[in-house]
Image (cartoon, helix red, strand yellow):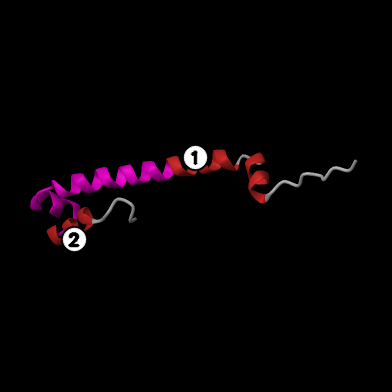
Amino acid sequence: MTTLAHTATPFEAALDQGAVSALLVGMARRVAIWERRARTRRALSRLDAAMLRDLGLDPMTAQAEAARPFWKG
């Protein structure tokens, strides 16, 4: 009786090489970046004109940045 040797698919080979761990770490980093962007954009939207001037920003620029979705860099 002959048996066919099992050849790992590229996906299975990647799993064997720790790609799942790398993928999860990458996803966690991405979520952390998104969370930081959302938090800082919310804070930016609460600053008054004097505070924005201290940062060197005009209100229109700050408003445009604060309105951007968190997933856009």
Return the residue at label 1: 25
Q: How far across and down, in percent of the image, does residue 52 sit? A: 14, 52
Locate residue 68 relative to residue 60 in the image: left or right. right
**Quadrant for the C terminus in the image:** bottom left
Which secondary structure lies at badge 1?
A: helix
Q: What kind of residue is marked 2?
A: Thr
Q: Which residue appears at 19% of the width and 59% of the height?
A: 64
Sequence-first disc among 1 and 2: 1
Q: Which residue appears at 61% of the width and 39% of the height?
A: 18
Q: Is residue 35 magenta?
A: yes
Return the residue at label 2: 61
Q: How far across and down, in percent of the image, does residue 37 sit? A: 30, 47
Q: What kind of residue is marked 1?
A: Val
Q: Which residues are magenta?
A: 29-58
Which secondary structure lies at badge 2?
A: helix
Outermost residue toward the front?
Answer: 1
Mark 2 closeness class: few <14, some 14–19, many ≥20 residues within 10 Å: few
Judging depth in this view, the residue of 60 and 67 nearest the camera is 67
By secondary structure, the bulk of the magenta-drawn segment is best described as helix
